[in-house]
Structures are given as structure tokens and as C-alpha cells.
Image (tube, rainbow, N blue to C red):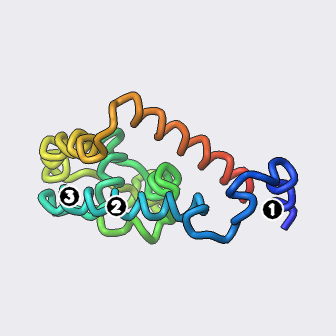
Amino acid sequence: AIYIQNMKSKNPEHPVAKNLLLLDQQMCFALYSANLALHKVYRKLLSQLDLTYPQYLVMLVLWERDEITVSDIGERLFLDSATLTPLLRYRATTDERQVIIALTDAGRALREKAQAVPEAVMCATDCSLDEIVNIKQQLEKLRGKLIDQI
């Protein structure tokens, strides 16, 4: 309620301040519906790799750094460990409580096939590289502000 009062008092004539409960005024709905559309694009592309979107994100992390703990992957992806269990696992030799995720040969080979995914997604957005970078930076900034509120 305080946030809404602050928003209204800063600019009471703004259309969003006047119509706070309209669906089309909701930032969350714009993000949610854009995310749904983006996932449909990814689903089509990733089905050719036999990956789900969460698996693709894990693979991106592993292609950057192989043999990483589940907790490190979860931290990197903002996901809990339970979401990350479908991959090859073995216990760390130094600490048996640590679960390490490692790429298989097939996982390494999949990297080459996945090279086309980012460009195909960018083409689907019909945005320039500068636009994509700007949107990504704005979303990361928003994520940071929201995380600060949690």
C-alpha cells in the first residue's frame, strides 16, 4: 500500500497510477507473457537438441565451467538444487557431501549443435544486437533491485 501511495503521489496523473489494477498496466504481466512467448521459441529450438529449457541453462553453465557443484549451478541460475538433478553426478573426492555435475562426452558434443540457438532466438525477436543487449541489461538491473527487496 505504501508503494502504491508513493507511486500515485509522485505522478498522480500518470495513466498507470490511475489504473493500477488493469492487466495491461502490469509490468509483471508484460514480463510473464514475453517469457511465455520466448519459451515457445526456445522449446521449438531445443526440441531438436532433446533439451528442456532448464536443461539448456544448466548446459550453458557446464559449457562455461565443467565439473561444478549443484549448489554453484543453482546459485548461477537462481534455482534450487532439486531442479538440477537430471544430469550425471558423482561425489567429490575431497568432500563426499558435495555433489558435482560433470559433462559427458555427449554433453560436450551437444555444445556444437547448440551454437545456432542464440542466433535463432535473436532472429525470432527481430531486435538488433544493441536492442538485445539493452533489454538484457535493463532486466538484470530490475532483477537486482527485486532481489534487494527480498
Given the image, on which type of amino acid does mark 2 rest? Answer: Ala
Kind of residue indicated by mark 1: Ile
Label 1 secondary element? helix
Q: Amino acid at mark 3?
A: Leu
Give the structural element (helix, strand or loop) at label 3: helix
Residue 4 has which mark? 1
Counting residues from the start of the chain, the first of labels 2 and 1 encountered is: 1
Label 1 to label 3, Cα distance in Å?
A: 40 Å
**Residue drawn at 34 percent across, 30 percent down:** 129
Which structural element holds mark 2? helix
> Disc number at residue 37?
2
Q: In the image, what residue occupies the spot 60% across and 61% down?
A: 25
The residue beneath circle 3 is 46
Depth check, front residue: 104 or 12? 12
Question: Callout 3: few (<14), some (14-19), or many (20+) C-alpha neighbours within 10 Å?
Answer: some
How far across and down, in percent of the image, does residue 2 sit?
87, 62
Quarter of the N terminus within the rendering: bottom right
Crowding at mark 2 (Cα within 10 Å: few <14, some 14-19, many 20+): few
Image position, residue 4 (x, y; %): 80, 62
Count residues near mark 1 (Cα–Cα under 10 Å), then give few for <14, some for 14-19, many for 20+: few
Q: Is residue 86 above or below residue 77?
A: below
> Whole-Å distance between the Cαs marked 2 and 3?
14 Å
Which label sits in the foreground, 2 or 1? 1
Q: Quadrant of the C terminus?
A: bottom right
Label placed on residue 91: none
Residue 81 at x, y = what percent? 47, 65
